[in-house]
C-alpha cells in the first residue's frame, strides 16, 4: 500500500487542478485507500457547508448592494471635503462641455458660423474704412483753429518731421491724429513758455504769413485726390509719387531756411515757390484723375 | 451587333460631331461682327467747317496727329476705330453756316456702343484741320503731334507732345512725357512734372505774348526763344537758355536744386538779379559789375540795402574787389570762409575772361551773398534768377 495522499494533493484533486497523470494516479490511490477517501469526503462536506453558508453572497450581483452602498458612502465622504472646489470646476466643465457641443458641426451650424464670420468681416472692413475716411477731417480743423495755437502746433510737428527724411506724404503727416492731440493740448495749456531759451525759441516759431493758405490748399487737393475711389494707374502713381517726394524735399529744405531767416523775404519766397510747385503738381494729378474717370 | 459594326457606327458619330462643330464655328464667324476680319479698313470722315474752327478730340491711348491743310474742312481718319463722328457743336444763337466748333467722337474696335466723347477709346487718329484752327487734344498714354495750326492745346499724361509751326497760342501739359515745341509763335505755356521741355525757335506774335515753362523734375531747354517776357521754373530740373536776349526783355528763372545755364551772345547786355542760398553760386564768363548783399538772419533787407558800399573783408577772397578774374584753378572758398557779415553790401568788378585761356575762366561768387546784382553792358534785359541750391552759369556763346 502506498502512502496516503497529502492534504494539498487532495485539495488540488478536489478542485480539479491536478494534471492528467497525477489525476489518474490520485484517483487509483483513492479507489484503494479508505483513509484518503475519508479525507476527501471530509473536504467535500466542508465545501458543501461553506457553499451553503455563502450561498446568498454568491447569488447576489457583484459587488453586492451593501458593498455598493459602502463604496458610495466612502466616496460621499470624500466628496464632502472637496465640494467647494468641485462646484466651480463642475460649472466650468458644464460650460466647456456646452462649448464643446457648439463645436460639434452640423450643416446648419456650419452655415450659421459662416454667416457670422461674413458679418464680422464686413463690420471690420466698414470700421477701418470709416476710420480712414475720418482722418483727413483733422486738416480743416488745423486750418480753422485759432491763429496762435495751431500755428505753434503745426510748426512743432513739422519741426519734429524735419529731422526725418522728407517723404512724399507730408500732407498726410500734417493730418495725423497726433497733430490734433497737440492742438487740443495747446488750447488748454495755459502754462508759460519754458525758461529754457532753446525751447522757447523753438516754440516761438510760427507759420509764416501765407503759409497757412498753402497748407489748406494742399490739404484740400490731397483730399480730392484721395477721395477718388479708383486706384491710380501704376505709371501715373509712380510719376506722381516720385515728383511729390522731390517737391516735399524742397519744401522741407526751404522751410528750414525760412525758419532760420525769418526776416529774409528771399528765403520765404523760396519756400512759397516750393509750396506753389506742390500745389501745381497736385492740381495736375487731380485733373489727370478726373480725366481718367469713366464717364 | 458585331464589333466591326459598332466601330463603324462610332466613326460615323465622331465624324458627324466634327462636321457640326466646324460648321457652327464657321457660321458664327461669318455672322458675328468680327473685329479682326477687317484689320486694314480705314475710317474717314470729313466735315466742312469755318476757317477758324475749334476742333476737340480726346482718347485713352493712341497717337494723335494733327496737321493743317488748305481746306476749310476737318477730316478725321483712323484704322483702329469702328466709327468716327464729327459732331458739330453750335453755340446757342449761332447763325447757320460753316461749323465753328467740332467734336471728334470715335469708338474703337473693342466698343460696339457707337462713337462717344468719353475719352475712353484707344486708337491712332489723324486729323486734318484748317490752318486757322484751334485744336484741343488730350490723351492718356499716347503721343501727340500738332503741326501748323493757329492755336494748340495738348495734354498727355505719359505720352510725348510735339508741337510745330503754331502761330498764336500753345498750351501743352504732361505728367511723365516730354514736350517739344519748335518753330512757333505766340503765347506759350508748357508744364510737365517728370518730363523734359524743349523749345526751339519760338517767338512772340504779339507784344505782350509770354513764354512760360514749368517742370518739377524735368529739364527745361530753351533755344532761340525771343519772347520779351520769359519765365522758366523747375524744382529739381536744370534750366538752360541759349540765344540772344530781347531788348528790354524780362527773364525769370527759378529752381530749387537745378542749375540755370544761360548761353548768351558776347554782346549780351543785361542786368542780373540773382537770389541764392546755401551752396548756390554764380559762375560767369561775362564782365559783371556785381553788387552783393549779405543779409544776416537778424537784418532786415530794407535797412541793409541802403548801406553804402564798403570793401569786402579779406576773409572772402572771391568777394573782394578785383579787376581781374580769379585763376581757373582757384579753389572755391570753403564753407568756413563764408561767414556772412551782417548788412554788408559789396561791389565786385569781374573782368571778362582772357581769350588766350583754353579753359574759360570762371569767377565763383560764393554763396555767402544772398542776393547778387550784376550788370553786363548797359543792362538792357533784366534777368531774375532764383536758385535755392543750384548753380547759375553765364556762358558766352
Image: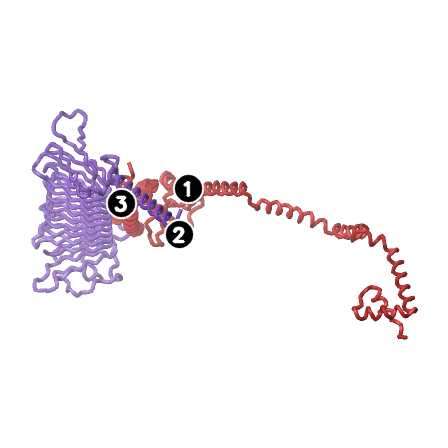
Which label was assigned to residue A199? 2
Q: Are marks 2 and 3 in contact (CB under 8 Å)?
A: no
Q: Which quarter of the picture shows residue B229?
A: top left
Quadrant hosting residue A44: bottom right
Query: Where is residue A103 shown, x and y percent of the image?
Result: 57, 46
At 19% across and 46% down in the image, what residue appears? B143
- Tag of residue A281: 3
Number of the front mark, 1 or 2: 1
Name the colour assigned to chain B in the rendering.
purple
Same subunit under labels 1 and 2?
yes
> What shade has chain A been given?
red
* Percent coordinates x, y for residue A223 in the rendering: 34, 41
Q: CA distance from mark 1 to mark 2?
A: 39 Å
**What chain is tagged by disc 1?**
A
Upstream in sequence: badge 2 or badge 3: 2
Q: CA distance from mark 3 to mark 1?
A: 27 Å
- Give a yes or no on whether discs 2 and 3 share a subunit: yes
What is the chain identity of the residue bearing mark 3?
A
Q: Secondary structure at mark 2?
A: helix
Residue A129 bears which disc, if any?
A: 1
Q: Verify CB contact (< 8 Å) between mark 3 and mark 1.
A: no
Question: Gap between marks 2 and 3, in whole Å?
Answer: 35 Å
Please tell me which residue lies in front, B118 or B227: B118
Q: Are marks 1 and 2 in contact (CB under 8 Å)?
A: no
Amino acid at each position: 500500500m502506498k502512502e496516503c495522499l497529502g492534504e494539498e494533493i487532495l485539495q488540488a484533486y478536489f478542485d480539479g487542478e491536478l494534471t492528467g497523470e497525477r489525476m489518474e494516479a490520485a484517483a487509483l490511490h483513492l479507489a484503494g485507500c479508505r483513509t484518503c477517501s475519508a479525507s476527501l469526503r471530509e473536504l467535500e462536506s466542508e465545501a458543501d457547508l461553506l457553499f451553503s453558508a455563502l450561498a446568498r453572497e454568491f447569488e447576489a450581483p457583484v459587488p453586492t448592494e451593501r458593498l455598493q452602498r459602502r463604496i458610495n458612502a466612502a466616496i460621499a465622504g470624500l466628496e464632502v471635503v472637496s465640494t467647494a472646489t468641485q462646484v466651480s470646476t463642475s460649472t466650468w466643465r458644464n460650460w466647456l462641455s456646452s462649448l464643446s457641443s457648439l463645436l460639434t458641426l452640423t450643416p446648419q451650424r456650419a452655415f450659421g458660423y459662416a454667416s457670422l464670420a461674413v458679418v464680422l468681416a464686413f463690420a471690420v472692413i466698414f470700421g477701418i474704412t470709416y476710420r480712414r475716411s475720418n482722418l483727413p477731417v483733422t486738416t480743416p480743423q488745423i486750418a480753422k483753429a485759432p491763429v496762435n495755437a495751431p500755428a505753434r502746433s503745426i510748426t512743432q510737428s513739422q519741426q519734429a518731421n524735419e529731422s526725418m527724411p522728407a517723404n512724399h506724404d507730408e500732407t498726410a503727416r500734417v493730418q495725423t491724429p497726433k497733430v490734433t492731440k497737440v492742438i487740443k493740448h495747446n488750447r488748454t495749456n495755459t502754462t508759460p513758455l519754458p525758461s529754457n531759451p532753446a525751447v522757447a525759441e523753438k516754440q516761438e516759431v510760427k507759420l509764416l504769413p501765407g503759409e497757412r493758405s498753402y497748407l489748406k490748399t494742399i490739404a484740400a487737393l490731397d483730399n480730392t485726390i484721395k477721395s477718388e475711389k479708383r486706384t491710380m494707374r501704376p505709371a501715373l502713381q509712380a510719376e506722381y509719387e516720385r515728383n511729390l517726394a522731390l517737391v516735399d524735399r524742397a519744401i522741407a529744405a526751404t522751410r528750414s531756411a525760412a525758419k532760420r531767416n525769418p526776416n529774409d523775404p528771399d528765403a520765404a519766397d523760396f519756400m512759397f515757390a516750393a509750396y506753389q510747385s506742390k500745389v501745381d503738381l497736385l492740381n495736375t494729378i487731380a485733373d489727370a484723375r478726373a480725366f481718367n474717370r469713366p464717364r | 451587333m458585331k464589333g466591326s459594326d459598332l466601330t463603324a457606327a462610332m466613326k460615323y458619330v465622331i465624324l458627324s460631331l466634327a462636321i457640326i462643330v466646324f460648321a457652327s464655328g464657321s457660321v458664327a464667324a461669318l455672322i458675328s461682327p468680327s473685329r479682326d476680319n477687317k484689320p486694314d479698313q480705314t475710317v474717314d470722315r470729313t466735315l466742312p467747317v469755318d476757317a477758324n474752327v475749334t476742333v476737340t478730340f480726346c482718347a485713352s491711348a493712341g497717337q494723335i496727329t494733327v496737321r493743317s491743310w488748305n481746306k476749310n474742312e476737318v477730316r478725321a481718319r483712323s484704322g483702329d476705330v469702328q466709327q468716327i463722328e464729327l459732331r458739330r457743336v453750335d453755340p446757342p444763337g449761332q447763325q447757320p453756316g460753316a461749323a465753328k466748333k467740332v467734336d471728334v467722337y470715335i469708338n474703337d474696335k473693342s466698343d460696339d456702343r457707337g462713337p462717344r466723347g468719353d475719352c475712353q477709346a484707344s486708337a491712332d487718329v489723324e486729323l486734318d484741320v484748317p490752318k486757322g484752327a484751334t485744336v484741343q487734344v488730350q490723351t492718356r498714354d499716347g503721343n501727340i503731334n500738332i503741326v501748323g495750326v493757329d492755336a494748340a492745346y495738348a495734354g498727355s499724361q505719359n505720352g510725348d507732345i510735339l508741337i510745330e509751326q503754331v502761330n498764336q497760342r500753345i498750351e501743352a501739359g504732361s505728367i511723365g512725357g516730354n514736350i517739344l515745341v519748335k518753330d512757333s509763335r505766340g503765347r506759350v505755356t508748357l508744364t510737365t512734372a517728370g518730363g523734359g521741355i524743349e523749345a526751339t525757335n519760338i517767338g512772340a506774335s504779339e507784344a505782350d505774348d509770354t513764354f512760360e515753362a514749368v517742370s518739377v523734375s524735368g529739364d527745361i531747354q530753351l533755344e532761340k526763344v525771343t519772347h520779351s517776357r520769359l519765365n522758366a521754373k523747375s524744382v529739381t530740373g536744370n534750366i538752360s537758355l541759349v540765344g540772344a536776349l530781347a531788348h528790354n526783355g524780362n527773364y525769370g528763372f527759378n529752381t530749387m536744386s537745378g542749375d540755370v545755364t544761360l548761353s548768351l551772345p558776347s554782346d549780351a547786355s543785361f542786368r542780373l538779379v540773382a537770389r541764392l542760398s546755401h551752396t548756390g553760386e554764380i559762375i560767369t564768363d561775362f564782365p559783371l559789375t556785381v553788387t552783393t548783399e549779405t543779409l544776416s538772419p537778424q537784418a532786415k533787407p530794407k535797412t541793409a540795402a541802403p548801406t553804402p558800399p564798403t570793401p569786402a573783408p579779406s576773409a572772402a577772397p572771391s568777394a573782394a574787389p578785383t579787376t581781374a578774374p580769379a585763376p581757373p584753378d582757384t579753389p572755391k572758398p570753403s564753407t568756413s570762409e563764408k561767414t556772412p557779415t551782417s548788412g554788408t553790401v559789396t561791389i565786385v568788378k569781374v573782368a571778362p575772361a582772357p581769350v588766350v585761356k583754353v579753359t574759360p575762366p570762371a569767377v565763383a561768387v560764393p554763396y555767402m551773398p544772398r542776393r547778387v546784382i550784376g550788370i553786363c553792358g548797359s543792362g538792357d534785359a533784366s534777368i531774375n534768377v532764383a536758385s535755392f541750391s543750384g548753380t547759375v552759369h553765364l556762358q558766352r556763346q
